[in-house]
């Protein structure tokens, strides 16, 4: 009798988590969950490619954390204001 695959080793679980995080990103202002979304999606794609020979839970969590951090840092660099520029608001939306 074959043992069932643990849920963290299933690619679609990571992709579903990425979808949930993407929905939260739309509901919460700011780029809070986008890095986590990209990290979870990358883990899901990696597990889909590797199949049942994927890494264990500690390695997946480390990979998720690392990919989330790297994607957040890249987005921060890509979407940042140019050096020395400050965002000023001259009007209020209620005026």
Image: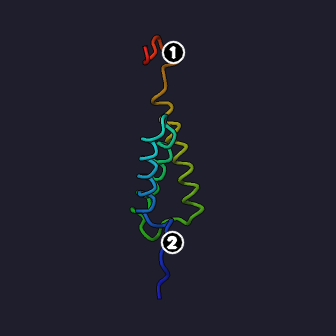
Q: Are marks 1 and 2 in contact (CB under 8 Å)?
A: no
Residue for point 50% across, 14% down: 88
- How crowded is the residue under tag 2: few (<14 C-alpha within 10 Å), some, or many (20+)? few
Q: Nearer the viewer, residue 52 or 31?
A: 31
Residue farthest to the front?
94
Residue farthest to the top?
90
Residue 12 vs 25, above or below: the answer is below
Query: In the rendered view of the protein, which quadrant contains the C terminus?
Result: top left
Rendering coords of residue 64 (x, y %): 53, 53
Where does label 1 land, which residue? Answer: 85
Do we see residue 42 in this rendering? no
Residue for point 49% across, 42% down: 71
Rendering coords of residue 5 (x, y %): 48, 74
Q: CA distance from mark 1 to mark 2?
A: 49 Å
SS at mark 2 in the image: loop
Q: Examine the image and state in which quarter residue 47 appears.
A: bottom left
Number of callouts: 2
- How crowded is the residue under tag 1: few (<14 C-alpha within 10 Å), some, or many (20+)? few
Residue for point 47% across, 88% down: 1
Residue 31 vs 2, above or below: the answer is above
Residue 40 vs 32, above or below: the answer is below
Colour scheme: rainbow
Residue farthest to the bottom?
1
Q: Examine the image and state in which quarter residue 44 appears.
A: bottom left
Q: Examine the image and state in which quarter residue 14 appears.
A: bottom left
Q: Nearer the viewer, residue 73 or 28?
A: 28
Where does label 2 land, which residue? Answer: 6
Do we see residue 36 in this rendering? yes
Rendering coords of residue 2 (x, y %): 47, 84
SS at mark 1 in the image: loop
Which of the two labelled residues, at mark 1 and mark 2, occupies the earlier sequence position? 2
Rendering coords of residue 37 (x, y %): 46, 48
């Amino acid at each position: 009798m074959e043992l069932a695959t643990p849920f963290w080793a299933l690619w679609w679980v990571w992709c579903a988590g990425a979808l949930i995080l993407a929905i939260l990103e739309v509901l919460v202002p700011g780029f809070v969950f986008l890095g986590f979304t990209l990290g979870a999606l990358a883990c899901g794609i990696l597990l889909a490619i590797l199949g049942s020979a994927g890494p264990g839970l500690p390695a997946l969590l480390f990979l998720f954390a690392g990919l989330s951090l790297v994607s957040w840092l890249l987005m921060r660099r890509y979407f940042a204001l140019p050096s020395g520029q400050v965002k000023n608001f001259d009007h209020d939306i209620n005026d």
